[in-house]
Amino acid sequence: MIDPSRITNYNLDRYGLEEHMMFWLLVAGKTAHVVSKQLEKMLSKVCGIPRKPFEDLSQLEVPLALFLKDHGVGCYNLKARGLYFLIHQNIDLAQCSVDDLEEVPGVGPKTARCFLMHTRRECEHAGLDTHILKFMRDHLGVIDTPVSTPFSKRKYLKYEKIFIEWARKQSGKTVAELDLEIWNSYSRKAK
């Protein structure tokens, strides 16, 4: 099962990458721990041993959207289109780029970057979720930081650059380490 509080893993095989990509696609706009449990329940229902998520899901006897809906996944039509695309386009999740991932329905700049940042060791991207944006306002003094993930590519890249430069120069941590530390800190405060 994916543990959102320890999501970073640079040693995933093909099937581990598939499961992580599914997590990032499904978690958009949802609570990470809830989605982790939903994903585990879904995969344990359809996957054999070893798990081959995309292959096993491609053999479902019900429509993918209905399967997601039955497991409590929100925005299930869009997320089903994204999963269908991933399953049938044979994207190499070990080598793909942000641009490749942003072609997937339901995957925007934050989702693409979070997947890459937490599965590739030297990745220099930032997932601008509400936690990172709040951290930027509260601790970096970037008062014009938006409250939610910017939709404009230009704006996204502007704030991503600020965060990455600060992480490199000031924190002594990788972007993924800092991202996870901030997410865990803010998640605990919300409880």
Image: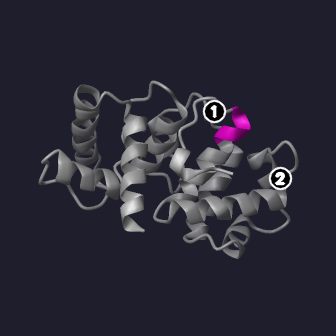
Magenta-colored stretch includes residue 14: yes
Give the number of the disc on residue 92: 1
Front-lying residue, 172 or 25: 172
N-term-proximal mark, 1 vs 2: 2
Foreground mark, 1 or 2? 2
| Badge 2 element | loop
In the image, residue 161 above or below residue 138: above
Asked if residue 75 is among those painted magenta in the image, a careful observer would answer no
Q: Residues within 10 Å of mark 2 (few under 14, many from 20)?
A: some
Q: Report the number of numbered marks.
A: 2
Horizontal side of 136 relative to 149 (left or right) equals left
Q: Residue at x 33, y 58 (%)?
A: 130
Residue name at image x 83 percent, y 58 percent = 46
Depth order, front residue of 149/170 = 170
**Above or below for 157 versus 165:** below
Residue 3: x %, y % from top left: 60, 50
* Residue 36 percent coordinates (x, y): 62, 58
Q: Quadrant of residue 172?
A: top left
Quadrant of the rendered structure where residue 176 is?
A: top left
Residue kind at label 2, given as amino acid type: Cys
Q: What span is colored magenta in the figure?
A: 13-17
Any part of residue 5 in sight: yes
- Residue at the disc numbered 2: 47
Q: Looking at numbered disc 1 in the image, what kind of residue is underneath it?
A: Asp
